[in-house]
Amino acid sequence: MLKRKELKPTVAPGMNDAEELNEEATEQEIETGDYTSVTTLSWDEVDPSKT
């Protein structure tokens, strides 16, 4: 049985995260499956006990 190499999410060096990750896939990219789903996590820094 072959062991699969675990793939971890990465960002290419020099990539403008905000601009590149928010760019929509083109119709051609969607048709060929050449796109990646991106999930953004945003941390809410407001302390609910102080409001």
Image (cartoon, rainbow, N blue to C red):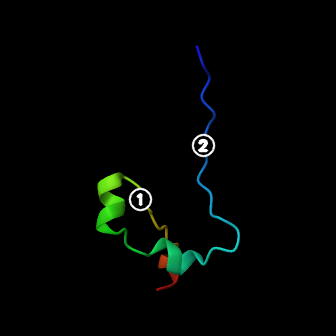
x 60%, y 29%: residue: 4
Per the image, label 2 sits on a secondary structure element best described as loop
- For disc 2, the marked residue is 7
Between 12 and 38, which is closer to the camera in this rendering? 12
Q: Few, some or many C-alpha atoms within 10 Å of disc 1 (few <14, some 14-19, many ≥20)?
A: few
On screen, residue 40 versus residue 9, left or right, reads left
Looking at marks 1 and 2 on the same chain, the residue that comes earlier in the sequence is marked by 2
> In the figure, residue 3 lies in which quadrant?
top right
The spot of residue 32 in percent (x, y) is 34, 53
Circle on res. 23: none
Q: Give the distance between the C-alpha atoms of the residues marked 1 and 2, in whole angstroms.
A: 15 Å
x 41%, y 59%: residue: 37
The spot of residue 38 in percent (x, y) is 44, 63
The spot of residue 47 in percent (x, y) is 53, 78
Between 50 and 42, which is closer to the camera in this rendering? 42
At label 2, the amino acid type is: Leu
At label 1, the amino acid type is: Ser
Can the viewer see residue 28 in this picture? yes
Q: Are marks 1 and 2 in contact (CB under 8 Å)?
A: no
On screen, residue 31 versus residue 41, left or right, reads left
The spot of residue 27 in percent (x, y) is 29, 66
x 47%, y 77%: residue: 48
Can the viewer see residue 44 in this picture? no
Quadrant where the image shows the N terminus = top right
x 63%, y 33%: residue: 5
- For disc 1, the marked residue is 37
Of all residues, the one furthest to the top in this rendering is: 1
Per the image, label 1 sits on a secondary structure element best described as loop
